[in-house]
Image: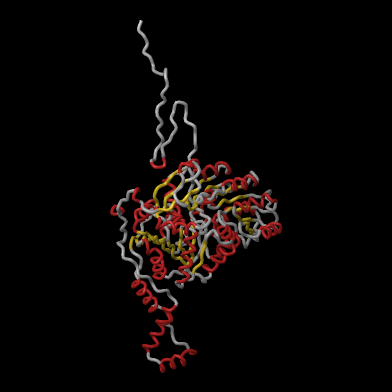
């Protein structure tokens, strides 16, 4: 098979059966003779075919001169992924790729029955795919034998480090034989990734597929839609109605936002599933399967829950909440426009967030088409166009239908029949929303009135479980509160830093919304928790009471009213005047 030169025959047959006619750049790079059986550090975005790439790269190491695997015994290869969904997706890909070679692929992921996984490992598997924490558990309990491991793959290594799995990864790599191959795949090669590679790889070849990534995102059309703050959800409804994608993925910043939007869209007649960290593994698997088999059209998800998922028919990505950085923007958008298919990425941009959206797109090197969401009239017009193009209107009348068609026409006029057809077509579709008219791309903040903090008005105080000792700073606390609490900067008043906690003033009109979004547990990010404070906090109680140095007056001022460090009086002691020396 010349089109797959250098690929083992069993895997080449699997590729042909799957419909492959050529390899992607990353697949060619890791199967080339220059890499051989060495280690590799590969920069590749999701959607570039990297799962098949490392599957092909592992084959010579696992099979050697053989064409098929023998009976399964202890594992020969380990693939580590950051999330359950991605791990199970990798398992599915490797199963069809190695089907002709007779490989058994097992999974070990959090949320699944560990006893069942243990039994699968006891029966034997050549390749094991799992998440860091669960793999470490199996190794610790002795149910995963690492003695014959010939290769370890770290998929989306950057994401695993971001999620705090470094210790687990180091444990897994140290448990594997020293002479193994180590392949690391990462969207970006940051300093932590480089350090991990240096510690656990040997003379790794650096492979970058930046040009392929650019082509991948070239299949995605980006649109930024300016909306009024109150119209964000209405705008998404109109976008979904206007494009009517086979599958759409809507990204939210918090689990609370996912739950709220899922409930509303269900009420509006959309077939919706949710994907967030609070769901069980079984619920998440069913949600994704509903999207794949057409039972659901829209998936509403948080970033972490949607990491690495692959929906073949995903045509539209909607950013209900703006991404926090360019990497998140590219990752979210990269769920669509895969394998040569076209896709669309739509950013919902409230007026006051326009400048931030512009900087985000510029930083990602993306040119988006700015505009307004489809109006109700435009959605209805698009419905009419789809109706006129419906194949049912152009198909010939079947023999089994002819008699009944004549009976209908004899009983009702053509106008009545057409009206019934139109009503039936529209009955299953949600009515579009009337939107507040805004100027597209109008994100000039200069017109916003300034406000004196002294005139902040009625407010409610909240306590955050982080303070000066944890290096808390307003410059990252404020964006975190806005991002997770559905707030704007104008909703946040005074911020009082204590050694072990921070008090934040939230405008009274926004306090209830903030508390509802955060939820009863009050979880933010980085393990920070929030709780409501009744009345005004006692700021003085949170300060450490240190005795003044000799010669200094005690600090009796209320420094909570004025920022800055206390200024102590200079010490006054007798006999400290420097005398001029007498001249001889």
Q: State left or right for residue 293 relative to residue 396.
A: right
Can you tell which quarter of the image residue 231 is in? Answer: bottom left
> Where is 235 relative to 526, above or below?
below
Residue sitting at x 48%, y 90% = 399
Percent position (x, y) of residue 74? Answer: 69, 53
Residue 244 in the image: x percent, y percent? 42, 70
Q: In which quarter of the image is residue 379?
A: bottom left
Question: Can you say whether 56 is above or below 468 in the image?
Answer: below
Using the image, determine if residue 178 lies above or below residue 18. Answer: above
Q: Residue at the left extreme?
A: 447
Quarter occupied by the N terminus: bottom right
Percent position of residue 260, x then y? 47, 64
Q: Which residue lies furthest to the top in this view?
A: 584
- Taking the image as shown, residue 306 lies to the left or right of residue 574, namely right
Position of residue 220 measured from the top left corner of the image (x, y, whole percent): 41, 61
| Nearer to me, 138 or 7 | 138
């Amino acid at each position: 098979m010349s089109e797959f030169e250098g690929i083992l025959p069993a895997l080449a047959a699997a590729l042909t059966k799957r419909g492959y006619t050529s390899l992607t750049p990353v697949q060619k790079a890791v199967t080339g003779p220059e890499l051989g059986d060495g280690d590799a550090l590969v920069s590749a975005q999701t959607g570039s075919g990297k799962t098949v790439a490392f599957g092909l790269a592992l084959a010579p190491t696992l099979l050697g001169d053989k064409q098929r695997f023998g009976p399964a015994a202890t594992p020969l290869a380990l693939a580590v992924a950051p999330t359950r969904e991605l791990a199970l997706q990798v398992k599915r890909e490797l199963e069809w790729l190695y089907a002709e070679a007779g490989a058994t692929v097992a999974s070990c992921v959090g949320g699944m029955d560990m006893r069942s996984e243990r039994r699968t490992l006891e029966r034997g598997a050549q390749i094991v795919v799992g998440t860091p924490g669960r793999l470490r558990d199996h190794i610790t309990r002795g149910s995963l034998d690492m003695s014959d491991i010939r290769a370890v793959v770290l998929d989306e290594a950057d994401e695993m480090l971001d999620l705090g799995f470094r210790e687990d990864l180091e444990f897994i790599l140290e448990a594997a034989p020293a002479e193994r191959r180590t392949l690391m795949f990462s969207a970006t090669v940051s300093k932590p990734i480089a350090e991990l590679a240096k510690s656990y790889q040997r003379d790794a070849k650096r492979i970058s597929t930046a040009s392929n990534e650019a082509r991948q995102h070239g299949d995605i059309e980006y649109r930024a839609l300016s909306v009024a703050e109150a119209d964000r959800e209405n705008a998404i409804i109109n976008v979904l109605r206007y494009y009517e994608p086979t599958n759409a993925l809507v990204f939210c910043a918090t689990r609370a936002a996912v739950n709220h939007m899922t409930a509303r869209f269900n009420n509006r007649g959309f077939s919706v599933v949710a994907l967030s960290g609070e769901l069980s593994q079984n619920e998440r698997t069913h949600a994704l399967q509903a999207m794949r088999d057409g039972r659901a059209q829209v998936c509403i998800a948080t970033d972490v829950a949607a990491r690495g998922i692959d929906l073949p028919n995903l045509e539209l990505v909607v950013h209900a909440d703006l991404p926090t950085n360019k990497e998140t923007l590219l990752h979210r958008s990269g769920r669509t426009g895969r394998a040569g298919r076209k896709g669309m990425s739509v950013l919902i941009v409230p007026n006051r967030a326009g400048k931030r959206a512009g900087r985000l797109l510029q930083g990602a090197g993306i040119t988006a088409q700015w505009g307004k969401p489809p109006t109700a009239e435009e959605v209805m017009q698009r419905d009419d166009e789809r109706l006129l193009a419906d194949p049912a209107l152009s198909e010939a009348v079947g023999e089994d239908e002819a008699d009944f068609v004549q009976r209908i026409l004899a009983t009702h006029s053509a106008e009545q029949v057409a009206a019934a057809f139109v009503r039936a077509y529209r009955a299953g579709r949600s009515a579009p929303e009337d939107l507040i008219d805004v100027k597209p791309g109008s994100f000039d903040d200069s017109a916003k009135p300034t406000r004196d903090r002294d005139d902040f008005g009625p407010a409610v105080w909240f306590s955050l479980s982080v303070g000066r000792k944890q290096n808390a700073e307003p410059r990252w606390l404020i964006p975190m509160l806005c991002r997770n609490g559905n707030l704007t900067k104008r909703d946040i008043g005074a911020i009082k830093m204590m050694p072990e906690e921070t008090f934040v003033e939230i405008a009274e009109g926004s306090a209830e919304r903030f508390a509802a979004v955060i939820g009863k547990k009050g979880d933010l990010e980085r393990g920070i928790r929030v709780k409501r404070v009744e009345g005004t906090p006692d700021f003085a109680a949170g300060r450490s009471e240190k005795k003044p140095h000799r010669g200094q007056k005690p600090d009796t001022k209320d420094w909570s009213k004025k920022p800055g460090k206390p200024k102590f009086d200079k010490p006054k002691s007798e006999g400290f005047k420097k005398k001029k020396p007498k001249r001889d």
